[in-house]
Amino acid sequence: MFSIRNLIPKTLLARFMLIIVVPSLIGQMLAVFLFYDRHWYNVSYYTSNIIANEIKWLLDNYHNVQTTDTNQHINEYLNLSYQFYQGIKLPKIRPKLNEELEIFKNILNLKLKKPVIVTLDHEKKIIVSIAFNNGLLKITFPTKLLLNPTTYIFVLWLIFLTILLLSVSLIFSRNQIKSILELATAADAFGREQRLDYKPSGAYEIRQAGLAFLKMKDRIDKQIANRTQMLAMISHDLRTPLTRMKLQLELMPSSEATIELQQDINTMTQMIATYLDFARGEGGENFQIIEVADWVVNFIQTKYPGRDITFDIKPQKHKVQIKPFAFARAISNLIDNAIKYSTKIKISISETKTSTLIEVEDNGIGIHGQEKELVFKPFYRSDHARSLEYSSNVGLGLAITKEIITGHYGTITLEDSKLLNGLLVRISLPIIKEIKDKTNEA
Ligand SMILES: Nc1ncnc2c1ncn2[C@@H]1O[C@H](COP(=O)(O)OP(=O)(O)OP(=O)(O)O)[C@@H](O)[C@H]1O
Ligand SMILES: [Mg+2]
């Protein structure tokens, strides 16, 4: 259905421009129609009067001013040239005239009280033919005496000024909108738990909004930190009674019940280790610059010997920086998942202009649609993962991995594996350019 809303542009820039353009266009149109139309009419009226007067004087004083008697000779008088044709009658044609010439013709008719024909010739001259003394008097004068060329100049100026005004306001509006977009990008990055460098900029109101956003971010960060700290404390405190229970169980005579209890205690110990890992975060580890392909292959072959993991490694031109312990944990989390949820694993490492890509894909059931976002949330597990027996799954693996990769200024995304039909996890790490690399090594 038609609605005025559909006509209003969607982006802020377009709206800004509309707010500037519409009033200035209306203003200019009013200026043209009210002011310039009248002005133009007056100018045409007065110039027409002057020429009409000159023609009247010529006719009134024809015998006094005429310099040559000869028929058809060109004579000059004031602004006019004229020729007399004896015995020729005024033709009956009535050429179509524009508005200015029509005004001129009417004034001439009024002043002379004689039939006249006004025409425009090719050489930008106006010709007035008048029946006179049993003949025809042809009076010629330049168009510029009558037709007002400033109309076009005025319109050209208007168009030029409009374009100038629009360009200037476009530049200014874009700068204003840039700071709003920066705030939007920062809020979006925060929502996705990506690292953000945001500084409020732009107009006062936008800076206020930016500061409010930063305050809110601080508050949320603090809350998360508090929660994590509490988790760390609880996990830490639970470890002691668990160790005691384990010892006591080992002293008891072995039976089906004690074996099951032991399994439960092992699961709980593993879970608590994961909680502590999560709560500890990356800690104060330092970055090291490495050949990532060699490092990953080496790490996986050492940690998962005998596993059927295939590699597809493209030659690497650049190095990346990692915090080895944290990065190892991130990669293990992915491999552990792949081992838990599938049977075949492939690791590919390649390079783009700006980053190194590490892809881990498997032939499991994969992660569908919306869940691809959800699995990064702490403690999120799919129903399938929950149903695994004796599983120590707590749903922290991917959350920890994401935290670590973001801490490496990289990104982690989930896709469907085309090759193995399971999950494809892609880690992208920024490469260290040659120059920076050398200075760091030196
Ligand atoms: N390779 C995979 N294939 C299919 N589903 C996966 C895969 N990796 C993760 N998932 C799904 O994502 C959920 C979250 O994974 P995450 O690693 O965060 O937790 P978890 O493996 O369940 O537990 P944890 O890693 O803490 O022991 C899992 O419960 C599982 O449903
Ligand atoms: Mg996991």
Image (tube, rainbow, N blue to C red):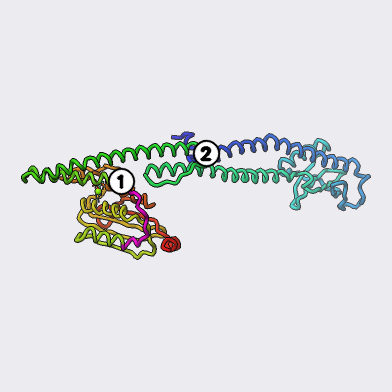
**Residue 186 on image: x %, y %:** 43, 43
Marks 1 and 2, the one that precedes in the sequence? 2
Q: Which mark is residue 327?
A: none
- In front: mark 1 or mark 2? 1
Instruction: State left or right for residue 288 relative to residue 198.
Output: left
287 or 183: nearer the viewer: 287
Q: Amino acid at mark 2?
A: Arg
- Residue 135's place in the image compared with 440, above or below, is above
Residue 286 in the magenta stretch? The answer is yes
Farthest residue toward the right? 64
- How packed mark 1 is, by other alpha carbons closer than 10 Å (few <14, some 14-19, many 20 or more), is few
Q: Residue at label 1?
A: 280
Residue 15 shows which numbered tag? 2
Start-end of magenta stretch: 281-294
Q: Is residue 370 visible?
A: no
Under 8 Å from ligand 1: the CB of mark 1? no
From the top left corner, tell me how far across and down residue 109 is, in percent.
Answer: 80, 37
